[in-house]
Image: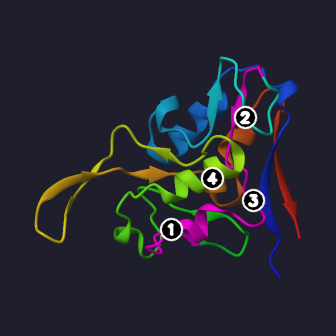
């Protein structure tokens, strides 16, 4: 059986510097933009599970043992690998991703479990599609952390070691 992967965030050690978000967007999209990052840094107070209520912090994918986003997708547009990492990514899309209709059920399932979703909507890469009646519409492009294939850019760049890459069975 393959080892499983997840990120561990030590919120109290985070300096809220945005380096993790910039490293992520650079790794995945080749640009330095916190809006194209699969890890978000919140500089304001937050009220979500997993982080100190009322304080700033990092919003990663929790890489749940039983991820709610994966079964929520009615179109099988997501995949889950042997390391228990759910994939839905713009440029490195898994098989079946083209079936995604941006119904947002994965986003809602994640938010229901964690108080806030770690599946993000790209502000720059909306995709055209045709409905069954032939009408042209724009679909949202969704993306989330895929752990950089076991070598997360956010972990490597964090100067305070507030993000840990954990391998477990």
10 Å neighbourhood of mark 1: few (<14), some, or many (≥20)?
some
Circle 1 residue: 73
Q: Is label 4 in contact with label 1 (beta carbons under 8 Å)?
A: no
Q: Earlier in the sequence, mark 4 or mark 1?
A: 1
- Whether residue 8 is in magenta: the answer is no
Secondary structure under tag 1 reads loop
**Residue at label 3?**
64
Q: State the residue at coordinates (83%, 82%).
A: 1
On residue 43, the disc is: none
- Pointer 2 or 4: first along the chain: 2
Q: Residues within 10 Å of mark 4 (few under 14, many from 20)?
A: many
Looking at the rendered structure, the secondary structure element under dot 4 is helix
Taking 38 as reference, is 108 above or below it? Answer: below
Quadrant in which the C terminus is drawn = bottom right
Q: Residue at x 58, y 40 (%)?
A: 24
Write down the residue under mark 2.
Answer: 48
The secondary element bearing badge 2 is classed as loop
Marks 3 and 2, how far apart at CA: 16 Å
Q: CA distance from mark 2 to mark 4?
A: 12 Å
The majority secondary structure of the magenta stretch comes to loop
| Residues in magenta, as a range | 54-79
């Amino acid at each position: 059986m393959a080892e499983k992967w997840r990120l561990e965030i030590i919120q109290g050690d985070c300096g809220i510097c945005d380096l993790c978000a910039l490293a992520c967007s650079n790794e995945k999209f080749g640009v330095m933009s916190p809006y194209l990052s699969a890890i978000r840094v919140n500089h304001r107070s937050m009220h979500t599970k997993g982080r100190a209520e009322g304080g700033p912090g990092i919003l990663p994918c929790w890489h749940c043992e039983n991820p709610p986003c994966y079964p929520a997708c009615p179109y099988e547009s997501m995949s889950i690998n042997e390391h228990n990492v759910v994939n839905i990514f713009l440029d490195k899309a898994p098989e079946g991703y083209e079936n995604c209709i941006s119904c947002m059920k994965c986003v809602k399932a994640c938010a229901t479990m964690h108080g806030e979703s770690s599946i993000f909507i790209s502000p720059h890469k909306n995709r055209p599609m045709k409905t069954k009646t032939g009408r042209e519409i724009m679909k949202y492009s969704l993306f989330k952390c895929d752990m950089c294939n076991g070598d997360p850019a956010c972990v490597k760049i964090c100067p305070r070691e507030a993000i840990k890459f954990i391998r477990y069975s």
